[in-house]
Amino acid sequence: MDDCGYVMAGTALLLMIPALIVTAMMLSLSEANSDMKTERTLSASVEGAAWDIRDNIPIITREILNETAWEVINGTIPEGDVRELVRGRVQERVDRLCMSHRNINASCRVNSVEGTEDPFQVEVNSTIEIHGGDIEHAENISVRVTVEGLPDPLPFRVLGRPEHSATSIEYGDALRGYLDSKGVDGEAYVNATGPLIIRRCPYEPYSCHGLEGLHACILNGYYHESRDGACYLCRLEGKTSCPHMGLETFIIPSVDVGEAPVSIDHVLFNETYNGEALNVSGFIIYLDGGHRTKYGVETP
Ligand SMILES: [Zn+2]
Ligand SMILES: [Zn+2]
């Protein structure tokens, strides 16, 4: 090889060095790039999982409340603390949901299922924790679920298994028998009827019912807020009254006997007191002064 050859080889070597450096830089860049991509994918997965859990807790809770209410109605509810049963069932379903997010580690602890100051809503409190690579996400969430559209389990807890259709309960002789067993004359409540499904009464304030509002309310089987009535979770447990903000609805008697136990569910299921007959477009109900004032009908 002559001198020229060495020069050529040397130059080529010198030229290769920057090329190598550039290649190395590009390689490390693309590595960093793919790290960033993984990071981005993970952070999207973590965020997606958080949304998924947040969105599904109310759906799951409503389904569990519905299933549990039907178990009460059909007499297949397991013994024990119903609130804890509901919470545990929601937890089980949420665990399954968390496991479906495979590339990350998601968990959600359902801390409580409880009533709220609005008796038509139940609140679920939980803590979500999600890890994906170096990304950590933790939050406490509190969501509300409506009980509207769910069946009312209380009459079935109190009276065993009265007949029901898709929307109403046919009390047959059950309510009369129950009242008689408490030493109260239940004659007016032979073949009484009442709503099965919880529906929020739209006549607000309640004092604007009047006879016309009461008629619509009876036909539709609406429920109302009541301090004296039991809340939905207590209804599931068979409590006829509770310290929480609760619900009340009308149970419609079949006979006009002038004066009879007041036609409000918690009055009939608890300590009964009498009211005078009120003709609401052909329906006879018995109301005391307090409930007449509440629903805006005149005291006789
Ligand atoms: Zn109403
Ligand atoms: Zn309650």
Image (spheres, grey):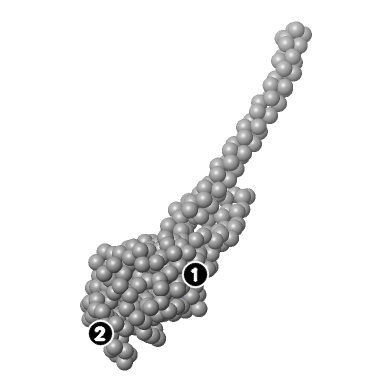
State the quadrant of the N terminus.
Answer: top right
* Residue farthest to the bottom, as pictured: 183
* Residue farthest to the front, as pictured: 300
Q: How far apart are marks 1 and 2 (CA)?
A: 35 Å
Q: Cβ(mark 2) to ligand 1 < 8 Å?
A: no
Q: Residue 115 carries which label?
A: 1
> Which secondary structure lies at badge 2?
helix
**Residue with the mark numbered 2:** 187
Say which amino acid is labelled 2.
Answer: Glu
Where residue 75 appears, x then y in whole percent? Answer: 29, 76
Say which amino acid is labelled 1.
Answer: Gly
- Which of the 4 image quadrants contains residue 225? bottom left
Foreground label between 1 and 2: 2
Binning the other alpha carbons within 10 Å of mark 2 as few (below 14), some (14 to 19) or many (20 upward) gives many
Q: Cβ(mark 1) to ligand 2 < 8 Å?
A: yes
Q: In this view, does 224 lie above or below 1?
A: below
* Dot placed on the residue nearer the N-terminal end, 1 or 2: 1
Q: In this view, does 31 lie above or below 49?
A: above
Left or right: residue 16 compared with residue 57: right
